Image (cartoon, rainbow, N blue to C red):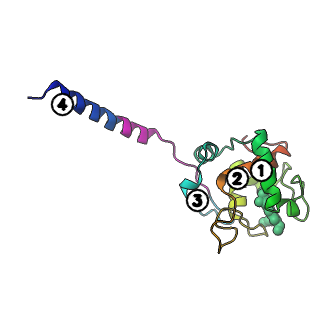
């Protein structure tokens, strides 16, 4: 005969299992990040998306740092540290490399934050090197921008532009 206690715990276990199942089913799929060069998957390790903003970006493709003053300030620092300013100008207005703030981009996808993330992470075939962690200096996996840093760099670029990239 089943005691009340056994019955209660059986019920609890099945409820937990059900909750587990339900939450797996409703979990949104991550966005599909692809290389600007050829559209192949970037396969960035999920663990690298290690902040609430980076996790939100991976789930939605939106950059939560747009308009966030602290993030923009930090992004500007990285923009200069990684010499983006040397090629693209101090405010991304363009120098020896194209401007990043206009309404027209060489690669139209860069008008979105997902597209710009992909371009900066993995580079282009036309002279823009990959800046993503582990790709920038192939022999040194610790070099390069982490996803969270890259979102801040993008927030800085967009702060000089009329578009947010989250449109
Ligand atoms: C050595 C020079 C150089 C540096 C440093 C550099 N870039 Fe670039 N970047 C380029 C060139 C050249 C292009 C154009 C590439 C092409 O036509 O395929 C480009 C293209 C881009 C584009 C695409 C623009 C468009 O019109 O579609 C973005 C976005 C970008 N760079 C962001 C950055 C960021 C952010 C950094 C710093 C982390 C950076 N770049 C560092 C040279 C550079």
Pointer 3 residue:
44
Q: Are marks 2 and 1 in contact (CB under 8 Å)?
A: yes
Q: Element at badge 2?
A: helix
In this view of the protein, which residue sits in the foreground, 54 or 3? Answer: 3
**Disc 3 residue: CB within 8 Å of ligand 1:** no
Which segment is the magenta one?
19-33
Residue at the image point whose x is 72% and y is 65% from the top: 123
Q: Are marks 3 and 1 in contact (CB under 8 Å)?
A: no
Res. 111 visible in picture: no
In this view of the protein, which residue sits in the foreground, 3 or 18? Answer: 3
Q: Which mark is residue 75?
A: 1
Q: Are marks 4 and 1 in contact (CB under 8 Å)?
A: no
Q: Which mark is residue 149?
A: 2
Q: Is residue 19 above or below residue 33?
A: above
Q: How far, Cα to Cα, is label 4 from label 1?
A: 56 Å
Q: Residue furthest bottom?
A: 139
Residue 160 is situated, as x and y percent measured from the top left of the image, at 86, 46
Pointer 4 residue:
6
Q: How far, Cα to Cα, is label 3 from label 1?
A: 21 Å
Q: Earlier in the sequence, mark 4 or mark 1?
A: 4
């Amino acid at each position: 005969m089943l005691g009340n206690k056994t019955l209660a715990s059986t019920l609890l276990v099945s409820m937990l299992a059900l909750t587990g199942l339900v939450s797996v089913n409703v979990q949104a799929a991550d966005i599909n990040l692809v290389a600007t060069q050829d559209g192949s998957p970037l396969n960035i390790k999920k663990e690298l998306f290690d902040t609430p903003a980076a996790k939100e970006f991976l789930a939605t493709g939106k950059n939560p740092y747009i308009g966030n003053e602290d993030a923009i300030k930090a992004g500007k620092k990285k923009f200069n540290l990684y010499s983006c300013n040397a090629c693209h100008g101090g405010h991304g207005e363009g120098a020896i490399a194209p401007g990043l703030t206009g309404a027209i981009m060489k690669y139209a996808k860069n008008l979105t934050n997902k597209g710009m993330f992909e371009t900066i992470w993995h580079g282009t075939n036309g002279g823009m090197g990959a800046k993503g962690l582990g790709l920038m200096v192939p022999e040194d996996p610790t070099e390069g921008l982490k996803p969270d840093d890259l979102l801040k760099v993008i927030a800085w670029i967009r702060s000089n532009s009329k578009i947010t990239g989250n449109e």
